[in-house]
Image (spheres, helix red, strand yellow):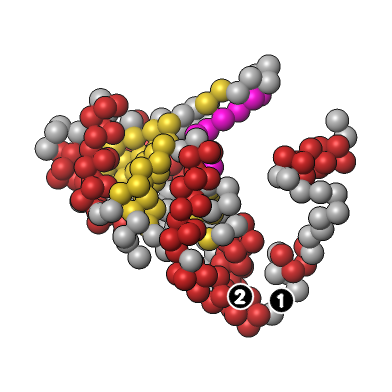
Amino acid sequence: MDSREFIGNVRQALGRSDDDTVDLTTSSHIDLSADEVGARKDSVKKTMIENALPLFNQMQTSAEQAGWRVIRLHSIEQAKIYVRQVVQEMEAISVLQSKHSLVQDLGLTLDLQAINVSINTMAMSEGSTRESLRDMAINADIGVTGVDYAIAETGTCVIIPDEGVSRTISLLPPVHIAVLKLGDVVPSLDELFTLRRDAFLNGELGTYMNLISGPSRTADIEYTIVTGVHGPGEVHLVMLDNEI
């Protein structure tokens, strides 16, 4: 299969015709000034708020199609109960959580310690090293993170690195629970790239971003789809529809 055939297959899978064209300079914002990017960012943020519920509904549908185990809840307390339920069903003994503010709001520590489950927060402290934090993620049964942005079109959760927010939490434990709040969903990758371009121009881009579209899948071995080889085989998406 040559590159043209490959691209043609991708177009067909996305429901696009050969007549569809993309202006790469515009979509990637390469030729836009900082002010123009800032204006686009403001427009995206406005869309996220004004269309928060329709985007949330679309995200739910796309995420379910992508393989997420989606649960729609209405409060932080309900989310905490759900996480505890997953922990008990998995008979997990070790949970690792990120420092996303939404995750910290869940107040999981005392709740899980009460049922003799070890819970740690991925954060550098005195005596800790990058290696020790990585080992913590490797040994965890479940990783719990927030979601910085979600993409309604593809059911993708986006995690951006920060202190206490590492991709290892969502990649190394066999089960990942992501918590998403209303108002953090963008329509497509185009809007996400607008926000990230603006962050770059303001010196806030970071080193990478993690895009998660369902459980880990690979077809490297005899073209057979296998889950959980390069990441979690089970992913839960907790959608809080009254948090904005």
Is there CB contact under 8 Å for labels 2 and 1? yes
Q: Is residue 235 above or below residue 14?
A: above
Q: Position of residue 164 (x, y in %)?
A: 36, 53
- The nearer-to-camera label among 2 and 1 is 2
**How far apart, in angstroms, are the residues tagged by discs 2 and 1?**
10 Å
Residue occupied by mark 2: 40
Residue at 47 percent across and 71 percent down: it is 50
Q: Please state which of residues 113 and 44 is positioned toward the viewer in this rendering.
A: 44
Q: Please give left or right for residue 183 compared with residue 201 in the image.
A: left
Q: Quadrant of the N terminus?
A: top right
Q: Position of residue 166 (x, y in %)?
A: 43, 48
Residue at 58 percent across and 52 percent down: it is 153
Q: In the displayed orientation, state which residue is furthest to the bottom.
A: 35
In magenta stretch: residue 216 = yes
Residue occupied by mark 1: 32
Q: Which one is earlier in the sequence, the residue at label 2 or at label 1?
A: 1
Q: Position of residue 72 (x, y in %)?
A: 35, 47
Instruction: Say what amino acid the circle numbered 2 marks.
Output: Arg
Question: Can the viewer see residue 25 in this picture?
Answer: yes
Residue at 56 percent across and 59 percent down: it is 187
Q: Is residue 20 above or below residue 41?
A: above
Residue 20: quarter of image: bottom right
Main SS of the magenta part reads loop
Q: Quadrant of the C terminus?
A: bottom left
Q: Position of residue 182 (x, y in %)?
A: 39, 60
* Residue stretch rendered in magenta on the structure: 212-220
Residue at 46 percent across and 53 percent down: it is 57
Within 10 Å of the Cα at label 2, are there few (<14), some (14-19), or many (20+) other Cα atoms? some
Q: Secondary structure at mark 1?
A: loop
Q: Please state which of residues 183 and 161 is positioned toward the viewer in this rendering.
A: 183
Instruction: Say what amino acid the circle numbered 1 marks.
Output: Leu
